[in-house]
Image (cartoon, grey):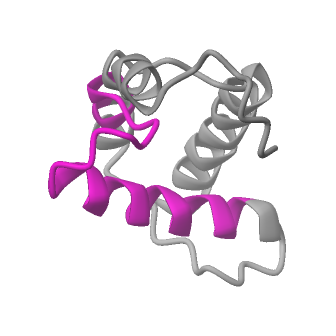
Amino acid sequence: NGNTSCSFTKERIQLLNNIGFEWSLASCETWDVRYEELVSYVETFGDARIPQKFAENPSLGNWVNNQRTIYKKFQNGNTSCSFTKERIQLLNNIGF
């Protein structure tokens, strides 16, 4: 928000990011909800190849696309993203 009197430094933010700190509880809940939707999709259709513009559930299509993007960043060493090894394992378990 541009407040320069905040005691958070870039270094502190990076330290929290490095340990997987979730800045928004809603993002954790949303991830879990979308993951469950993805599991249902895989059970129904047999794969996790959801198009980005999935008409039946646009939010899920966008979420899947975002997970792929975040995963690529994570693989390239970007530790500031909220991707964790646990989330990668969950996605791998369903053939993502």
What residue sits 62% from the left and 79% below the top?
Answer: 52
Q: Position of residue 35 (x, y in %)?
A: 60, 39
Instruction: Say whether residue 93 is magenta.
Output: no
What residue sits 46% from the left and 71% below the top?
Answer: 49
What residue sits 53% from the left and 62% below the top?
Answer: 66
Q: Quadrant of residue 51?
A: bottom right
Q: Quadrant of residue 44?
A: bottom right
**Outermost residue to the front:** 5
In the displayed structure, 45 sits above or below 96; it is: below
Q: Position of residue 64 (x, y in %)?
A: 55, 61
Q: Which stretch did the figure color magenta? A: 60-89
Q: Position of residue 69 (x, y in %)?
A: 41, 66
Count the labels in the image.
0
Question: Along the horizontal axis of the image, is 70 left or right of 29?
Answer: left
Give whichever of 43, 6 is nearer the camera: 6
Give whichever of 46, 8 is nearer the camera: 8
Instruction: Say whether residue 70 is magenta.
Output: yes
Question: Along the horizontal axis of the image, is 50 left or right of 84?
Answer: right
Question: Along the horizontal axis of the image, is 49 left or right of 8?
Answer: left
